Amino acid sequence: MDKITGQAEITIQAPIEMVYEYLADFSRHPEWVKNVYKLMPLTPGPQGIGTKFRTIEFTPPTSLGRALAATWQYTLGVFKGVAPMSICEITALTTPTYIAWAGYLTQGKTGVFNRAEWELQLEPHGNATRVIQRFCYLPYTAGSRKMLAALGDGSGIAASCAVSLSKLKQILEQRPAAILQSA
């Protein structure tokens, strides 16, 4: 099985504790991750390591041609039993420097179509925070491999991550205190 890896990074003019607090609240991910529409908790209680969510996602931000090709591959997978929503699970929370989670799409009753492991590394830079987002996709089927290839593999997915990180920067630099108070 091929691994598809990459990363994107950005510096946000906000203190690391504030950035971490915002990112560790997974219910806020649809605000900044451009292809995540909604996360629905599957695990009762407060969010922490082991918390699972059902996730409604769209095609990551990319060119129209890539989006159509990737969506076509995913749609073919749905006809072969791929679930219409992914599952994600928080795998690490190290205040204030590290957040990780894994997400996957099931196929049939016991199979996996695609799995992705994500991490956010936060580094303080004075009053700013450097955010490094890394990913590792594990395509389990030929269809998921074609879907990821349509997105441009590592470089295409990294470019999509950069779009989301830019949105994160915009949110946290515009109204940082008000954002955290509304949570």
Image (cartoon, grey):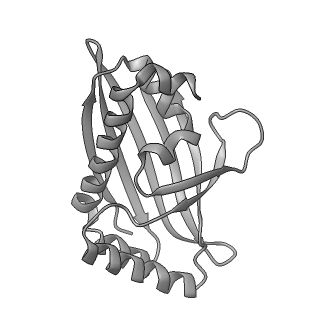
172 up-or-down from 70: above or below: above
- Residue 134's x, y, as percent? 34, 45
Q: Quadrant of residue 124?
A: top left
Q: Position of residue 1 (x, y in %)?
A: 39, 69
- Name the outermost residue toward the right: 44
Relative to 123, is 55 above or below?
below
Q: Is residue 180 visible?
A: yes
- The quarter of the picture where residue 69 lies is bottom left
- The quarter of the rendered structure image containing the C terminus is top right
Q: Tell me if 47 is positioned left or right of 5 in this view.
A: right
From the top left corner, tell me how far across and down residue 81 is, in percent: 61, 82
**Residue drawn at (48%, 55%), measured in percent from left and top?**
36
For the point 41% across and 77% down, the residue is: 71
| 5 lies left or right of 24 | left
Q: How many labels does the image show?
A: 0
**Residue farthest to the left?**
155
Q: Which residue is drawn at 29% across and 50% down?
A: 163
Viewer can see residue 96: no
Extreme residue in the top direction: 126
Nearer-the-camera pick, 102 or 2: 102
48 on left or right of 45:
left
Vertical placement of 21 versus 57: above or below?
Answer: above
Q: What is the x, y in percent for residue 107?
A: 59, 76
Work out whether 10 lies above or below 16: below
- Taking the image as shown, residue 41 lies to the left or right of residue 13, namely right
**Residue appearing at x 66%, y 42% in the figure:** 51
